[in-house]
Amino acid sequence: MVKIENEELSQEKIDHLKDRIKNQVEVIDAINNITRIRILLLLWIYKEQSAKDLCEKLGKSWPTVTKHLGVLEESGLLKVREVKSRGQFNKKIYSVIPNLLAYTRLGFDFLKLPPEDIVEILSHDLRSDAKTIEIIKKIFEDLPPYYDELDRKLFELSPTRKNMDDFYFKKHINYYVELLDEEEFEFYFEKYQGMLKELETFRSERKKPKKSIQTDKIYTVLDIILPIKEIQEARFKRFWKT
């Protein structure tokens, strides 16, 4: 289990930490929109896209897409380069800044702040989490038609060992569900934190030969821990009260 050292922070460190958390909260607010999430997903998948490319893939109008691109760009989440093109204006090509997701994680440092500040941050974080869950729900709405397409494509594949392995592990949606008691949760969470540190080490080592590395981000890993006892109690106790 992660342990938070209750060290006394100087006012300077408290102010610095508050500023950093405020920036992270602003990033989360900028991302919390289903169209902007879809834009980021497309930029992760294809590395770079013009506004026209995004309009075609999203099925959205130019004003809508450029409005959301403006929000993301203003929040410092996008890299933009211009390509000379015919006409009065150069074409803008968009990509996502490296390590964007790191800017959305509050981590545990804020738990070192005075308790009254922690309450304010947690309150904002709860509202942000609720929005994020709504967005995840909408993204999952893409899965039923995707599975229909998978079912069709399965029977078009040549049934070789490699094709079957690739289909199951890379096309099929793999998920793992487990129920944990308190001790198992602490064991799992400790291992999970260790895995994240190993992933960051792996990324750092991979970047060493090059100044920067940008690869297609074609997979998403969702690791969600649900406190199901608290969730169910909140549901049925509220039902009885009403």
Image: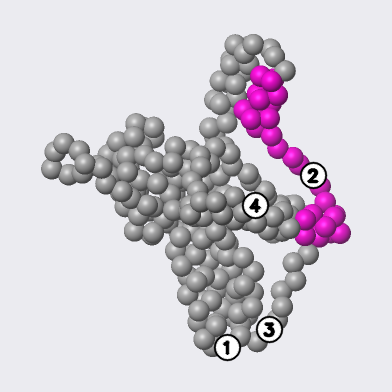
Whether label 2 touches label 4, CB < 8 Å = no
Query: Quarter of the image holding residue 122?
Result: bottom right
Q: Is residue 45 a member of the stretch shown in magenta?
A: no
- Amino acid on which the number 4 mark rests in the picture: Phe
Q: Marks 1 and 2, Cα distance to the nearest angstrom?
A: 42 Å
Q: Earlier in the sequence, mark 3 or mark 4?
A: 3
Where disc 1 sits, the SS reads loop
Look at mark 3 in the image and give the residue it sits on: 7
Percent x, y for residue 68? Answer: 35, 48
Task: Give the label, 1 or 2, closer to the camera.
Answer: 1
Q: Is 179 part of what is drawn in magenta?
A: yes
Residue picked out by circle 4: 202
Residues under labels 3 and 1: Cα distance?
Answer: 10 Å
| Viewer-nearest of discs 1 and 4 | 4
In terms of secondary structure, what is the magenta stretch mainly? Answer: helix
Residue ID for mark 1: 10
Which three-letter amino acid code belongs to the residue tagged 2? Glu
Q: Is mark 3 on a helix, strand or loop?
A: loop
Residue 88 vs residue 223, the one in the foreground = 88
Kindly identify the residue that appears in the image at 51 percent across and 60 percent down: 103
Give how far across and how far down residue 147 sits, in percent. 60, 24
Report x, y in % for residue 30: 42, 56
